[in-house]
Amino acid sequence: MKFDFYLSEMSVSDKHGGGLTLQRILGADLNDIDHFVHVNRFAMDLHVKDGLPGRSHDLLSIWESDWMRKLIGRSRASSMSKRLGMIKLHANGAAKKMAAIFKHKQELTGLVCPQGANAIFTLEALKKIKQVKYITWVMDDHLVSYVNDAWQYPAGTEAIFGKHLREAEHVFVISPAMQAFYKERFGVASSVLFGSSGTVEKGASSKKISGPLKIGYFGAVAAWQRDALKAVAAALKATDTQLYIYSGVERLPDDILLDGVHFKGSVAPQEVLTEMQNYDAVLLPISFQQKIRNMSQFNIATKMSEYLACGVPVLAVGPPYSAMIHYLNDHQAAITVASIKENDIRDGFKQLHNSQHVAGLLKNAQKLVTNEVGAEPMRRVWQAVVNS
């Protein structure tokens, strides 16, 4: 299927999980998208992959421009850009610019990957100018938040988001948890499609399961990981387990860089798999913070699929409501610790010494990569929709 446009707050970049997901699953189908339209600063800051700049359009709000950020300060400019009135004003302008790009076409086809309100309102404004058929793929729902034991959308956004989902030709979501939530909240059916892995690596089941444990972590040290990383670091005390962290940050926070933690800096993408296989396990930390529960409960990170394919057992530490904890438990493909307590995390360390248990986990992980989370099975889900 050929698309006239891709519309999102994020770019098809090598610098973040969403961009990598698009490349791995769409593959050559990216060549069938005529224009890549970005309506948020996030896309501009993380540049598109080689070969796409000539087809990319950064239609940013005035509040996200360099000169405005310099004039009134980044914080104030960011605050202004998030006001609903400013979002709608920006959306109307962006839609007119998109219509001008396609001035000779009355009916457009699009792939929309909304991260927040910008893409959603821009598409709604475009629908008033052109006929639009689109597929939407929600990788992150940054609009919804968990407040007073309930999910809430900002005023003026829930109805328009529901309309966006219902009017799509098809809806893709990032996890079974998001699929169930949208079905209950909006009455919308969807297909699950999340970041894929490469081919499964075999042979790691023969790794030692006695003596000191070496656990590797490969990824960001940001809000979505930090508190779980801190808990694992604290649980290392008085154990024979060591944690090695590979990340692009300049230094680790003091509350993570504790005894037993070793900061290794960044590692080249082509060397990550080799480094992973030097460890007895790889760590998947998921935040317990309520303020980013929308990410923990609904999102499946690309890193999870990559870990499952690396041939090393996965230790996942996250809240019991986490989409990844549920997914890994359902498939018995990882050691999961749904607690931030030190003793519970240490019990997870002990399970890595159980050779029979670890062998079973690795076998299940291999099956998952072959049948579900690998690039080929995920791509088949995509193609079944677009080819129909």
Image (tube, rainbow, N blue to C red):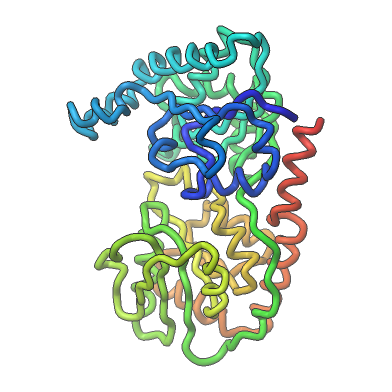
Instruction: Point out the image quarter for the C terminus.
Output: top right
Residue 74, image x, y percentages:
23, 34
- Residue appearing at x 45%, y 61% in the figure: 219
Looking at the image, residue 123 lies above or below residue 28: above
Looking at the image, residue 288 lies above or below residue 39: below
Query: To which quarter of the image does residue 201 belong?
Result: bottom right
Q: Nearer the viewer, residue 181 or 227?
A: 227
- Residue appearing at x 63%, y 39% in the figure: 180
- Residue appearing at x 48%, y 15% in the figure: 97
- Residue appearing at x 72%, y 28% in the figure: 2
Looking at the image, residue 347 lies above or below residue 325: below
Q: Nearer the viewer, residue 188 or 306?
A: 306
Q: Nearer the viewer, residue 168 or 158?
A: 168
Looking at the image, residue 60 lies above or below residue 322: above
Q: Residue furthest bottom?
A: 211
Query: To which quarter of the image does residue 75 belong?
Result: top left
Visible residue check, residue 302: yes
Visible residue check, residue 117: no
Query: To which quarter of the image does residue 362 belong?
Result: bottom right
Left or right of 181: which side holds 215?
left
Q: Nearer the viewer, residue 366 or 4?
A: 4
Residue 11, image x, y percentages:
50, 38
Left or right of 72: which side holds 336?
right
Instruction: Point out the image quarter for the N terminus.
Output: top right
Residue 148, image x, y percentages:
39, 38
